[in-house]
Image (cartoon, helix red, strand yellow):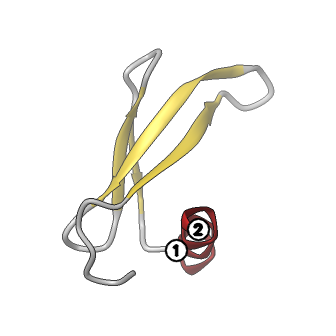
């Protein structure tokens, strides 16, 4: 998966100790990080490279 641009993952924006806010569509960036926005509130999301998360993304693709 390393080096693949255009990879997309979906996650949930959850407000701690409250409810779910919206859906976040994350896009893989050229540097290997993930970036996206919450569909409901518009909050920006950034994730560093994370082997566990990337493994989950690969498992969902297969």
13 to the left or right of 29: right
Height in image: 27 above or below 32?
A: above
Tell me where residue 32 appears, x and y as whole percent.
31, 73
Q: Which mark is residue 35?
A: none
10 Å crowding of disc 2: few (<14), some (14-19), many (20+): few
Front residue of this view, candidates 6 and 17: 6
Q: Where does residue 10 sit, x and y in percent of width and height?
A: 52, 45
Based on the displayed image, in which of its 4 quarters is residue 29 positioned? bottom left
User: What's the mark number on residue 50?
Assistant: 1
Hey, which residue is sitting farthest top in the picture?
Answer: 40
Q: Are marks 2 and 1 in contact (CB under 8 Å)?
A: yes
Residue at the image point whose x is 59% and y is 70% from the top: 62
Q: How many circles with numbers are drawn on the protein? A: 2
Distance of label 2 from label 1 (alpha carbons) = 5 Å
Residue 52 in percent (x, y) is at 63, 75
> Dot 2 lies on which element?
helix
Quadrant of the rendering where the N terminus is positioned: bottom left
Seen at 63% across and 70% down, the residue is 59
Which residue of the protein is positioned furthest toward the bottom in this rendering? 2
Residue shown at the point (43%, 73%) measured from the top left: 49
Q: Quadrant of residue 8?
A: bottom left
Residue placed at 37% from the left, 21% from the top? 42
Residue 15's image quarter?
Answer: top right
In the image, is residue 22 above or below residue 55? above
The residue pinned by badge 2 equals: 53
């Amino acid at each position: 998966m390393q080096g693949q641009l255009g990879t997309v993952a979906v996650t949930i924006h959850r407000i701690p100790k409250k409810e779910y806010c919206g859906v976040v569509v994350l896009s893989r960036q050229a540097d290997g990080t993930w970036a996206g926005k919450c569909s409901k509130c518009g909050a920006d999301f950034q994730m560093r490279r994370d082997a566990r998360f990337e493994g989950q993304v690969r498992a969902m693709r297969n």
